[in-house]
Image (cartoon, rainbow, N blue to C red):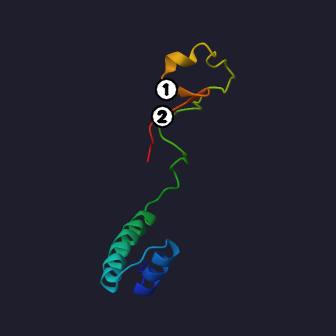
Amino acid sequence: MQITNDETKKIAGLIRIHLEDSEVTTYTDQLNTVLSAVDVLKELDTAQVQETSQTHGLTNIVAEDEPTFGLSINEYPKMGNLQKSYFVVDKVL
């Protein structure tokens, strides 16, 4: 499968990136290289390969959400800078 420069421009528009004309050819070539690799994979016989959604054998490792008691009002002063029962933290941005 090969794509054209026009299709690369359309893809760029869909993902909302601007490509210069000089970049369109470069990205078209790169996308065609990836698609060629996928075409090679399509030739493999996978009839005997079992479907899988993950490979580590893990099951649900998330703990149950159980309510617990938080800090008491007496513990707040030990936690740092407070104003009107709210924690004051440094700006993140």
The residue closer to the viewer here, 8 or 87, is 87
How far separated are the C-alphas under marks 2 and 1? Answer: 8 Å
Q: Is residue 73 above or below residue 5?
A: above
The N terminus sits in image quarter: bottom left
Look at label 1 and name its amino acid. Asn
Estimate how packed mark 2 is, as few (under 14), some (14 to 19) or many (20 or more) residues with alpha carbons within 10 Å. few
Image spot of residue 39 (x, y percent): 42, 69
* Residue at 55% from the left image edge and 48% from the top image edge: 51
Q: Quadrant of residue 72?
A: top right
Where does label 1 land, which residue?
81
The residue closer to the viewer here, 2 or 15, is 15
Look at label 2 and name its amino acid. Val
* Residue at 49% from the left image edge and 81% from the top image edge: 10
Image spot of residue 27 (x, y percent): 35, 76
Return the mark for residue 49: none
Where does label 2 land, which residue?
89
Q: Is residue 75 above or below residue 7?
A: above
Q: Quadrant of residue 19?
A: bottom left
* Residue at 61% from the left image edge and 26% from the top image edge: 85
The residue lying furthest to the top in this view is 74
Estimate how packed mark 1 is, as few (under 14), some (14 to 19) or many (20 or more) residues with alpha carbons within 10 Å. few
Please tell me whether mark 1 sits on a helix, a strand or a loop. Answer: loop
* Residue at 44% from the left image edge and 73% from the top image edge: 17
Please tell me whether mark 2 sits on a helix, a strand or a loop. Answer: loop
The residue closer to the viewer here, 25 or 33, is 25
Judged left or right of residue 1, residue 21 is left
Image spot of residue 24 (x, y percent): 36, 81
Mark earlier in primary sequence (2, 1): 1
